Every structure is written in C-alpha cells, then in structure tokens.
Amino acid sequence: MRIYEADLRVVAYGDFTFIDPLDSLEEFVEGIELPPEFVTSPISLNICCDSAAVPENPPLEANVQGNNDFEHNNVGPLPFSRHLHPHDFRLTGACKLTALEITDNDIKVLEEGLRPFGNIANDFTLPSLRTLMRYMEAWRIGLSRHFPVIHFPTFRLGNCIPELILAIAALGAVQALEEHTSRKLYKAARAVALERLQVDRFDSQSAETLVFLLIYSTWARDASVVTEGFELHEPILQYMRGSDVAKHDHSIEQTWIEWALSETERRISFLAFCFFDIHSIIYNRPPSIFTRETHLRLPCSVEEWQATDDQEWAACRQAKPSDPISFKDALESLVTAEAAGWETLPCAFGNLILLHGVLQRIYLQRQLSFGSNLGDQTIHEIHIWQRVSGSDLHPISEHGPIPFTSVAFLTVAYVRTHMDIGPHMLLASRDPKAVASALFSIAPLQRHSNLTSALLHAIHSLSLPVAFGIEHVARSQSILWCCQHAVCALECAIFLSKWLETIATTQMSNPLEPYESHILSSVESVIKEAVDSADWEHMDTPSWFQSPRHMGIAVLKVWSKIFSEKSAWAITVHVGECLNEFAGMYERSFQHMT
C-alpha cells in the first residue's frame, strides 16, 4: 500500500508509511520565516488627508474603450463612477501598490454615491476617513492573500462603486475586531447592492461586491446572516452564467489592462464557486453550480498576476508560454492517466479551485452511496490532486496562505471518503448543542487500512497548532489560520475521536494491527505535547492517556481550546463551542457505560 503524504516527515513501518508529527519540532519552527504581522504592532497607514498631501504617483491616462469613454481633465475620472471599472485606467509608469489610499475628497464623493440609496440605508453613517482606511488596510494585509481576486497593480478604490468599498470595509472591520461596525457596513453594502441590481446592469463590480458579502455571511455570528448569504447564490449565479469572460481565455491580443479586467472577472467567478462548495461542505447545501458548467480556464501564474507593469507582465508571459488549462479539462484529467504527466499547476489558487471540484464530486457521490466508504477511484483522485498541487504543509509559506488552506481541505476530502459527515453538519444553526448532538449521532467507523491517509492527515492538522503552541495559536488565529481551518479542524476532530472510540470498543476482540498501534502512538505524542504547552487548569490530563477512548476526549478538548479564545471571526469560536459540547457528550456517555 502506498500512502501519499506530500512534504510530510514520515517513517516507514512494514508496508505502511506514517507521519511523525513532532519529529524535529525545533527544526520545523525555526525553519519558518514569520511575516512582519506575526508580531502584534500598529498598522502603518498611508493616509492622505487632502488632495494636496497625496504623494506623487505615475500619471493616469484615460482608457477610452467602448462605453467607458470619459472626459479626461486635470481632475481625473470621477471616483466611484458607474462607467468605470476599478482597473479601468492605463499606467504610463511602473506602479507597485503599497497601500490603499483614499482622500477626504474621495469620502465626499462616496457619500454622494450613497445619497440616492438613503431611503434603504437611512440609519447608516459612513465612518471617518481614518477609520475607513484602517479597515481597508486590515482587509488588504490580513484577508486579500486568502482571496486573490483584486489585481493590486491596477486597482484604485476611487474607481469602485460605493457598495464594493463598503463590503471590503466590512471584512476589514471584522479583521480589526470591530464587529459592531462591520455589521453596519455589511448591512449597508448589502442593501445598496441588491437595490442597484433592480435598476442597473449586473457587472463585475456588482458581482465582486456580492461575493465579498457572501464571504462575510459565511463566517458571521448570527444564523440570520448566514441565511442571507444563501440568498446571494442566485444573483451571483446569474452573473457567472451570463459573463462573457470565457471568450477571452485564448485571446493573445489583449493589453495588460484588458487582461487584468478579464483575469479579475475569472477569479471572481472561481471564488464564488469555492464558497458555494464551502456551503455544501459545512452547511450541507446542494451545489449551486456544477463543475461541468464551469468552462473558464484556471487562473494565471503568480508571476503574471503580480507583475507591476505591462513590460513585466509581457516578460512573464514570454518566459513561460503555455496553453491555458481549463478547469473542466483539469478536473477530468484527475480521473484519467493524463494527469500523471502534469507538473505542478502554476497557481496555488488554481490548485484550491481544482480541489473544490474534487470535493463537489465527493459530495455528489455521497448522495448516491449507501455505504460508509467511497470507492478507491475517489481516493485515487485525491492522491493525484495531492501530487500535482505541491501544497505547502507549513502555515507560513512563500506562496501565501492558500497552499496551507488547500491542505486543510485535502484532509476534509480524505475524511469525507470514509465518514458521511455532511447531513450532520448543522453549523448554519449557530447552536452548539444542536451541532454537537447531530455530530454525536454519526455511526462508528469501521476499522480498515484504507483509513490510514485520513487518520494521518487528521493527526498532522492537530500537530501543527500544538507545535506552534496552543496558547499562542488560540490568541493569534488570524495570523496562522483562516476560518476554513476551523471548520476543517471540526471534521478532523470528530473523525479522529470516532476512530479512537472504535478502537476502544473492538481492540479486545480484534487486536490492533501494527499500523494501528503506530497511529495510536502518534496521537499520544501529540497529546503529550499539547498537555505540556498549555494551561489546562483543573482538567485531569493524566487520565487522557488511559485508553483510546480517553485519548478521543483529549483530542476534542485540545481542539476546543485552540478555538476557545475570542477571534476576529465568530465561526472559529463557534467551532470551539461545538467541540466542547461534543466532548461533554462523549464524556457523559463514557461515564454512563462505566
């Protein structure tokens, strides 16, 4: 049996391959270059209080195309104009965006842009320039790396519609731990966006606004806001199905600006697809759009996306000429021998999109399956994706956070092949007791060597926060993790505890296989490190090592502690509450048996 464990430190045991999650821990931690924001410090803002104080930038030249004609004068294009795209200008010199800038005059224009919608947002007051800028920077620094849909070299806030700015600010306000203000910004952005759809054409800015609102609602505290996110599926789908961006997939005549426009629109559609799939995973909603309906090519390479001017962009394209890979073709190749000859895909975002395609296939297969385990073909598809993705198992990577997020969803893919957790995911209720009760009702796992990959990934996902230090990770989740990691951790914890319960109830009649003994040893090693690295107050931690069942309780308690502290995003605390409730049910059932 061959277990694919990309980039894991592994040891061989007989015919099996295992991870030693804490092997060379010091080397692992020291080998990670922490980003500047890892150390808590004030955000450095580049705020211009008036137009006279604006630093000198390369001049902007009007991009006169089609219906986007505008009068170019000394003042420049009107900010927030409906006839401008945020990327709709041409730079005559190189531009590397170091901060999102907005002036007092921009605020006035933003207020004017919101005035026609005063009847639906009459209780909304726009934050001050300094506050708004702080939210924008919090979003840019903390969240934009997770959602690479804005082309910063050509992006200008002054060319955005008002609701897009409010949606970005709402996400940034959450990241800045100002949830009360973020809710106001979200409500205003949503009201304006939906109202505009009634009277104006649906363009990429409107779609981008709705996708950002979808992200906000997905991780919100209130169940009612989560439901509001479900209501956004239909208008976003209208945009995705009506967009003509696919016709530019093979165009070689595009300018840099035209390319940035079409690449941005493509990425917006893919980000929406990813969050539709996340809704299927964590809220058990049927897919809103199927993979076969997605005909776009995968996103471009990182080098092209980050090029700061048209010359650098052209050089990147010339250095790595290649035919665009469509999402549909790439996904189909995973089930054939064709993917065996692939090299790593050129973009981490593309890898994540492809993995969400695999997860959708798993979701649909679950609807037709009567057994607890899916077929070997599904596992083969996951193995192939893992090989071609090159995903980084380290939380801090030179490629950004997306490869690490992909590893979290990779673990979910492995878990879902062996445990039908979907119907039991009641996270949309935001009721920890209801969620825990539903998860507790999942049938026990059957012992089988095919579980090995899923178990090893579940152990590794727990070993990482333990390696960094539970107390530290609990207080700095926004630095190391994202919301996706919280919900993926929930599945890992349930899966591992269910397996440990199965071992506890069957090991007397069915002795452990060698690989099972090694997995138990790995779990025990992680728990020992967790006990040493955190304050467990009055918990009876020595009892955690008495039996596999006690170890299952320990796994749940360690994960719940990781998500016990106040976080920027309410979903992470909610996951901690659900795990704590589940651990309580587990303990009470154990006490009842004894």
Image (spheres, rainbow, N blue to C red):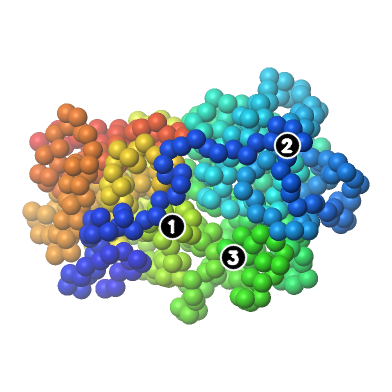
Mark 2: few, some, or many residues within 10 Å (few <14, many ≥20)? few
Helix, strand or loop at label 3? It is: helix
Front: mark 2 or 1: 2
Helix, strand or loop at label 2? It is: helix
Residue corresponding to mark 2: 53
Mark 1: few, some, or many residues within 10 Å (few <14, many ≥20)? some
> Looking at the image, which residue is at 35% across and 44% down?
490
Residue corresponding to mark 3: 303
> Looking at the image, which residue is at 58% across and 57% down?
290
Helix, strand or loop at label 1? It is: loop
Q: Does 228 appear above or below 294?
A: above
> Looking at the image, which residue is at 83% across and 40% down?
78
Q: Is residue 112 among the parts visible in the rendering?
A: yes
Percent coordinates x, y for residue 404 in the rendering: 42, 55
Mark 3: few, some, or many residues within 10 Å (few <14, many ≥20)? some
Out of 58 and 146, give the one closest to the viewer.
Answer: 58
Q: Tell me the quarter of the image containing the C terminus.
A: top left
Percent coordinates x, y for residue 229 in the rendering: 58, 38
Percent coordinates x, y for residue 231 in the rendering: 62, 38
> Amino acid type of disc 3?
Glu
Residue corresponding to mark 1: 397
Q: Is residue 535 left or right of residue 194?
A: left
Q: Tell me the quarter of the image containing the N terminus.
A: bottom left
> Amino acid type of disc 1?
Ser
> Looking at the image, which residue is at 73% across and 57% down?
261
**What's the distance in space between the residues labelled 3 and 2, CA to CA?**
33 Å
Q: Is residue 308 left or right of residue 551?
A: right
> Amino acid type of disc 2?
Ala
